[in-house]
Amino acid sequence: MKLLFISRLAGLFALLIAGQNMAFSCPVCFGALDDPATNGMAYAIITLLGITGGVLAGFVSFFLRLGRGSRGVPNERSEP
């Protein structure tokens, strides 16, 4: 068990040392503000947030309407 841990740790250390040049991120992840991909990603996030907010607002308004409508309906089990 200890040998397995040491071998994995040595492998991770070797990857960190040997792979330093391969660990660069893309412009979107790195945060290049003038890159077209970054602008597209920002517009996509805003669009998805708008769609999600619209659907959630629809659910809330539906349940509020159900709640308001049920106030005016008399209970069938109530005695006159």
Image (spheres, grey):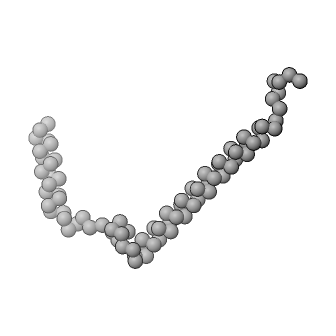
42 w.r.t. 70: above or below: below
Give the residue drawn at x 11%, y 38%.
Answer: 2
Q: Report x, y in % for residue 16.
A: 17, 59
4 w.r.t. 25: above or below: above
Give the residue drawn at x 17%, y 58%.
Answer: 15
6 w.r.t. 31: above or below: above
- Quarter where residue 55 is shown: bottom right
- Quarter where residue 20 is shown: bottom left
- Residue that sits furthest to the top in the current view: 79
Q: Report x, y in % for residue 50.
A: 57, 61
Give the residue drawn at x 15%, y 42%.
Answer: 5
Give the residue drawn at x 78%, y 37%.
Answer: 71
Q: Relative to residue 14, is residue 80 drawn left or right?
A: right
Q: Report x, y in % for residue 9.
A: 15, 48
Front residue (pair 60, 37): 60
Q: Relative to residue 64, is residue 56 drawn left or right?
A: left
Front residue (pair 79, 36): 79
How many numbered circles are shown? 0
Q: Relative to residue 66, is residue 41 drawn left or right?
A: left
